[in-house]
Image: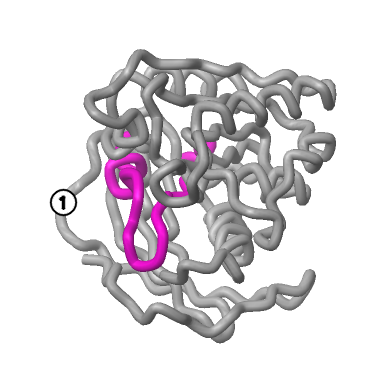
């Protein structure tokens, strides 16, 4: 299984255009994903070694593909990377859920996201012209940031995004740079970012939607009924929201 508990601080990675070196080690870890194959992968960027889950639908492809960016802070993995990977394969996509370096700081996290996308698009059974990105909580913020920086994706799904402070590089002003279709999902009782950053996730998602709309790229924003004690936990499993995700991805990929 993936080693998710690692040092609080990891060496920073700086990715320069044309200077990204990826090495891949694949190991099948037992069993198949629903509708295909599930693997643990190790993909290496210099000097940081990163791991992730890769799920392949049944068949030879080429397939559309989706990179999923998990949430969490430090060595806590938020969301459902393995389950999302498998659910994507069951829906006919190559799913890839990279696990970022386990730092509380976001330094280097966008590099990790970009490296994962680069790896995914390089697989010979992936249609590199039909790739999307999805993210939850901090992974949602990173998806927003990657799309604003011209990531080669056709669509973005952002679930209950965290709203990182300005030093992270996150700003709603970057909405003007996002030209791909965007799906925003949040539960009415989501308090996840309020717990970790003192922020209201629900209000933050409204602001993200407003920023995209003002920039001329109105997203599809879906509010879900209150989920248990905290709507942030809705995305810790594959639930009712998944139908909306698959419908959106199939429309745009």
Quadrant in which the N terminus is drawn:
bottom left
Quadrant for the C terminus, please. Answer: top right
Q: Position of residue 12 (x, y in %)?
A: 59, 80
Q: In this view, does 194 lie to the left or right of 80?
A: right
Q: Is mark 1 on a helix, strand or loop?
A: loop
Q: Nearer the viewer, residue 200 or 125?
A: 200
Quarter of image, res 184: top right
At horizontal 49% and vertical 50% (from top left) the residue drawn is 197
16 to 253, vertically: above or below: below
Q: Looking at the image, which residue is at 70% across and 44% down?
A: 147
Q: Residue furthest left?
A: 31
Between residue 29 and residue 97, name the one nearer to us.
Answer: 97
Q: Is residue 243 above or below residue 20?
A: above
- The reply to whether residue 165 is in sight is yes
Residue 68 is inside the magenta segment: yes
> Quick check: 219 above or below 233?
above
| Residue at left offset 44%, top offset 58% | 98
In this rendering, does residue 67 appear at all?
no
161 in magenta: no
Magenta-drawn segment? 61-87
Kindly identify which residue carries mark 1: 31
Q: Quadrant of residue 40?
A: bottom left
- For the point 28% across and 25% down, the residue is 239
In the image, residue 77 sits, relative to residue 24, either above or below, namely above
Q: Where is residue 203 in the image (x, y as percent from the top left)?
A: 56, 27
Q: In the displayed image of the protein, which residue is found farthest to the front?
A: 198
In the image, 123: left or right of 75? right
Could you say where residue 205 lies in the image, as x and y percent from the top left? 57, 29
Coloring scheme of the render?
A: one colour
Would you identify the image quadrant in which residue 29 lies?
bottom left
């Amino acid at each position: 299984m993936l080693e998710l508990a690692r040092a609080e601080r990891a060496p920073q990675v700086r990715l320069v255009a044309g200077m990204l070196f990826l090495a891949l080690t694949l190991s099948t870890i037992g069993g198949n994903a629903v509708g295909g194959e599930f693997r643990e992968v190790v993909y290496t960027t210099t000097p940081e070694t990163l791991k992730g889950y890769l799920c392949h639908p049944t068949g030879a492809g080429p397939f559309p593909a989706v990179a999923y960016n998990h949430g969490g802070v430090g060595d806590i993995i938020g969301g459902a990377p393995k389950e999302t990977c498998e659910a994507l394969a069951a829906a006919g996509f190559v799913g890839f859920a990279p696990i970022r370096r386990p730092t509380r700081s976001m330094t280097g996290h966008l590099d990790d996201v970009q490296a994962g996308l680069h790896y995914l698009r390089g697989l010979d059974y992936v249609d590199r012209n039909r790739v999307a990105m999805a993210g939850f909580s901090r992974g949602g913020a990173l998806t927003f940031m990657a799309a604003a920086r011209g990531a080669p994706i056709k669509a973005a799904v952002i679930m209950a995004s965290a709203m990182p402070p300005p030093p992270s590089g996150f700003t709603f002003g970057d909405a003007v740079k996002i030209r791909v279709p965007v799906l925003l999902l949040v539960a009415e009782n989501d308090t996840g970012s309020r717990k970790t950053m003192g922020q209201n996730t629900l209000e933050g998602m409204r602001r993200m939607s407003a920023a995209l709309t003002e920039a001329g790229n109105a997203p599809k924003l879906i509010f879900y009924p209150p989920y248990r004690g905290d709507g942030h936990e809705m995305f810790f499993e594959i639930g009712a929201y998944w139908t909306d995700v698959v419908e959106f991805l199939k429309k745009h990929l």
